[in-house]
Amino acid sequence: MSLSLRRKLYPTSHYRVISAALLFAVFFSATSVSAQYGRTRKEHRGPRAIAVIEFPQGSKDAKTPVKYAPRLIPGIILNSGKYFDADAYMATPVPWAVQPGTVYEAREAGESKGLFTIRKAAADADKNWIATGVWDSAEAIAARAEAKRKAEEAKKAREAALKEQAKDTGPPKLKRGGGPETTKPAAKPVPPAPPATDDDPDRPRMRRGASDEPTGAAKKPEAPEAADPDAPELKRGKAAKDSPLENAPPPAPKQSPVQLSNNKVVAAISDATPDEDRSFLFPWKPEEEKRLTKLMSEMAEAELASGEEGDTTTTGAKARVAKKTALENVQVKAYDPATNNEAVLILTATAPPQRKEGAFNRYVTVVAHVDLDNLPHKLFSSVTDDDHLDTVGILQFVDAVDSDGDGRAEFLFRRIGKYEQKFELYRSYGTQLLKLF
């Protein structure tokens, strides 16, 4: 009995070797996983606002498109390491994320695409906050910078040419006449009389009030109190002064959920800490894109085959009966969120089944991970139709966005329902897709 207790309390050297080996294996595995799926920069606790810049689309008829003013929809805000609904966070009554003067940087798969400066914000009939302002695309900013650079170069060239001309001709000289006559010297100017001083007691004076300033003069405003340096803030500023002055297009009218899902959207970030340009796109070849798009379409058809609406994941997903379903508006995008050469595919599509009542659409979104055999495996799916938009909204994919500034991308979606729209944020870890918000 004593031996067994002794062996249990004081392990032998052989047991120590095994324990050390196991600890080393666990540590090495955790280190490799952290390097593969971990963060590339220190975690950013905020504040960091994520929004969507929407470019509404419309047409007077089937052939004449109408250009509407872009607008910003607040999405999610990160503060103190937690995510909040930006549409209601610190609303007084205007939410913090859409305060006038806030600047958002549009980013597409991690690369800068322009700036949006908020001028004003208001809630629509469904109490969704929408901000309007000045949109300045990256192309316009680059074009103005190039024009400014060329103008400065031309100015320097003119100044250099004038200096060279001065060296050749020398400084300018005055010439005198050759005759014996001499010119009379110019008369000296008479200095002005000195101003009257207050020493003369008999000098008449204007009578003023007790104040040094004239009566009716506007009082200078008092200096505002200094702002708290520790208070968190988003990126703020003014629109560029050299922005082209154009007549702003009209605002878009109220749109249906289907129309909203067809609008072009770009993710945008407002953060006092600047971001580095980093592409989260997965570089695939044309033949690889064609093959994976076909496999993703088959997966989407299988999701639509059951006729059920809602969200499903790899865990607890029901088997669906394979059935051929025609897809329309198929879009498949490939991303490398951790920049470790592991692709995540996202498909969005519609299916217009025929029925007697009239037009009817179904909507599907599928997220899949590509394994080592270059085959996609489903991580998540969402299916809905026109009859269920009040319970299951259309899941519109926005973009891969670095939501916490750590250099790793998350996936931003907008859930468009019959009466409201909300944003959802997901992060992929290999064969798992975790919902962050």
Image: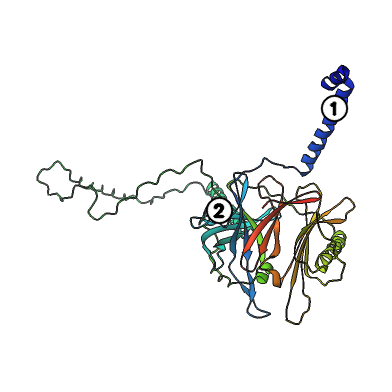
Position of residue 431 measured from the top left corner of the image (x, y, whole percent): 81, 50
Judge left or right: residue 249 versus residue 139: left
Q: Is residue 115 above or below residue 16?
A: below
Residue, x 30% and y 51% (percent of image)?
A: 219
**Residue 347 picture quarter:** bottom right
Please name the colour scheme applied to the rendered image: rainbow
Q: Nearer the viewer, mark 1 or mark 2?
A: 1
Disc 1/disc 2 C-alpha distance (Å): 50 Å
**Residue 137 picture quarter:** bottom right
> Mark 1–mark 2 contact, CB under 8 Å?
no
Q: Amino acid at mark 2?
A: Tyr
- The circle drawn on residue 19 is 1
Tell me if mark 2 has few (under 14), some (14-19) or many (20+) residues whose alpha carbon lies within 10 angstroms of its own: some
Residue farthest toward the left in the current orientation of the protein: 202
The secondary element bearing badge 2 is classed as loop
Q: Nearer the viewer, residue 197 or 377?
A: 377
Residue, x 51% and y 43% (percent of image)?
A: 231
Q: Nearer the viewer, residue 194 or 340?
A: 340
Position of residue 252 measured from the top left corner of the image (x, y, whole percent): 58, 71
Image quadrant occupied by the N terminus: top right
Q: Is residue 154 visible?
A: no
Name the residue that disc number 2 marks.
Answer: 89
Q: Amino acid at mark 1?
A: Ser
- Of the numbered discs 1 and 2, the one sitting upstream in the chain is 1
Position of residue 143 measured from the top left corner of the image (x, y, whole percent): 62, 59
Position of residue 204 measured from the top left corner of the image (x, y, whole percent): 12, 49
Tell me if mark 1 has few (under 14), some (14-19) or many (20+) residues whose alpha carbon lies within 10 angstroms of its own: few
Q: Is residue 42 above or below residue 327?
A: above
